[in-house]
């Protein structure tokens, strides 16, 4: 009896998308379809990645394509498509361009994979997650965005380096919108079971919080002509794995809020249980007054971006 493998589509074969396909294949999460509008790029990268299978020991078929028909019946779709901000391009220009791209992607995915779960990586993240939600017509639990996992990974990295301990032993979350107003939550950060606030002085913690908020820009400044892709793609695949294996992971994701944290009809980063049905439950954790005020500010920043493209209530 043959067993049907999971099918994962990655839309966008740039650095983030191609590396997401790499992580997904190496974890043997299922067969992978890499889709891009540029002819030859997904085909070449897909074939190259599949030819690594005998070396790395994973069994999955990796298909590069320019046609949405090849993505039919996907279980999970990771959307990385979009343009990067170019010199002379305003944030509003970037927002409007990516809004059109992500809308088209979500509509096509909904047509060919009506039961898929969408994980959005395109920026500006929170607005693009809402865009995909509206364009796909999917229920909100099946559309969510990758930002909190990435921002939290950066936060955890810097905390572990500061303490000189294993990265695995730091638990910390970043909430809110993916951008300058993100909220690293110090009141729920732990090394082992020890509160971070007992191990690192307050002034040093604020420096780490600031570095976390500027984590993406720090890498862009090094690369000059590109942006981060290893950690963003790994974060998206961790979310996909939680769905495909029904792991019930507690992860900070850009989820649709309907009253949680005092916000409605908006996507922003919150802790949620991620499993086979996508966002299975949003967890409302107790925040300090300062953290709650920062989260409210972050939510309003997302809402102001949504108004640029006429989204939201």
Image (cartoon, rainbow, N blue to C red):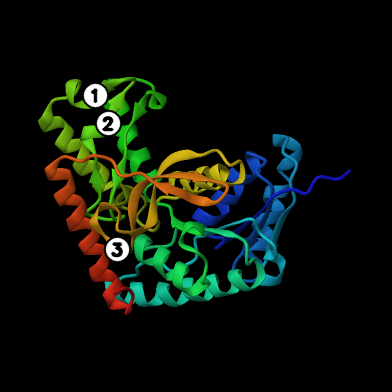
Q: Quadrant of residue 162?
A: top left
Find residue 257 and report its horizontal and vertical position in percent: 34, 58
Label 2 environment density (alpha carbons within 10 Å; few <14, some 14–19, many ≥20)? many
The reply to whether residue 88 is visible in this rendering is no
Which of the pair 263/189 is nearer the observer? 263
Q: Is residue 77 rendered to the left or right of residue 196?
A: right
Find residue 92 and report its horizontal and vertical position in percent: 29, 75
Which of the pair 118/211 is nearer the observer? 118
* Marks 1 & 2, CB-CB < 8 Å contact: yes
For the residues carrying marks 2 and 3, which lies nearer the camera in this image? Answer: 3
Residue holding disc 3:
264
For the residues carrying marks 1 and 3, which lies nearer the camera in this image? Answer: 3
Residue beneath the point at 21% across and 51% down? 295
Judged from this view, the residue extending furthest toward the right is 1
Label 1 environment density (alpha carbons within 10 Å; few <14, some 14–19, many ≥20)? some
Residue holding disc 2:
189
Which of the pair 130/21 is nearer the observer? 130
Residue holding disc 1:
195
């Amino acid at each position: 009896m043959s067993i049907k493998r999971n099918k994962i589509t990655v839309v966008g074969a740039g650095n983030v998308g191609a590396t997401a396909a790499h992580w997904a294949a190496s974890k043997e999460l299922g067969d992978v379809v890499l889709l891009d509008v540029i002819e030859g790029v997904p085909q070449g990268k897909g074939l190259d990645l599949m030819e690594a299978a005998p070396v790395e020991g994973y069994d999955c078929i990796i298909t590069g394509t320019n046609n949405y028909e090849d993505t039919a019946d996907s279980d999970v779709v990771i959307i990385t498509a979009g343009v990067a901000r170019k010199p002379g391009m305003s944030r509003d220009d970037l927002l409007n361009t990516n809004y059109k791209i992500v809308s088209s992607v979500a509509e096509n995915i909904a047509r060919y994979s009506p039961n898929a779960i969408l994980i959005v990586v395109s920026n500006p993240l929170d607005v693009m997650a809402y865009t995909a939600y509206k364009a796909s017509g999917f229920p909100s639990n099946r559309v969510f965005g990758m930002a909190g996992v990435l921002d939290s990974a950066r936060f955890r990295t810097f905390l572990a380096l500061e303490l000189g301990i294993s990265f695995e032993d730091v638990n910390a979350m970043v909430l809110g919108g993916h951008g300058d107003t993100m909220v690293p939550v110090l009141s729920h950060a732990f090394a082992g079971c020890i509160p971070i606030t007992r191990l690192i002085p307050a002034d040093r913690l604020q420096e780490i919080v600031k570095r976390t908020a500027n984590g993406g820009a720090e890498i862009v400044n090094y690369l000059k002509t590109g942006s981060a892709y290893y950690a963003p793609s790994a974060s998206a695949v961790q979310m996909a794995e939680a769905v495909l294996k029904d792991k019930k992971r507690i992860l900070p994701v850009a989820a649709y809020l309907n009253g949680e944290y005092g916000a409605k009809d908006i996507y922003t980063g919150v802790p949620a249980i991620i499993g086979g049905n996508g966002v299975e439950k949003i967890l409302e954790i107790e925040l300090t007054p300062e953290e709650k005020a920062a989260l409210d500010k972050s939510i309003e920043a997302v809402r102001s971006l949504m108004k640029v493209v006429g989204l939201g209530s």
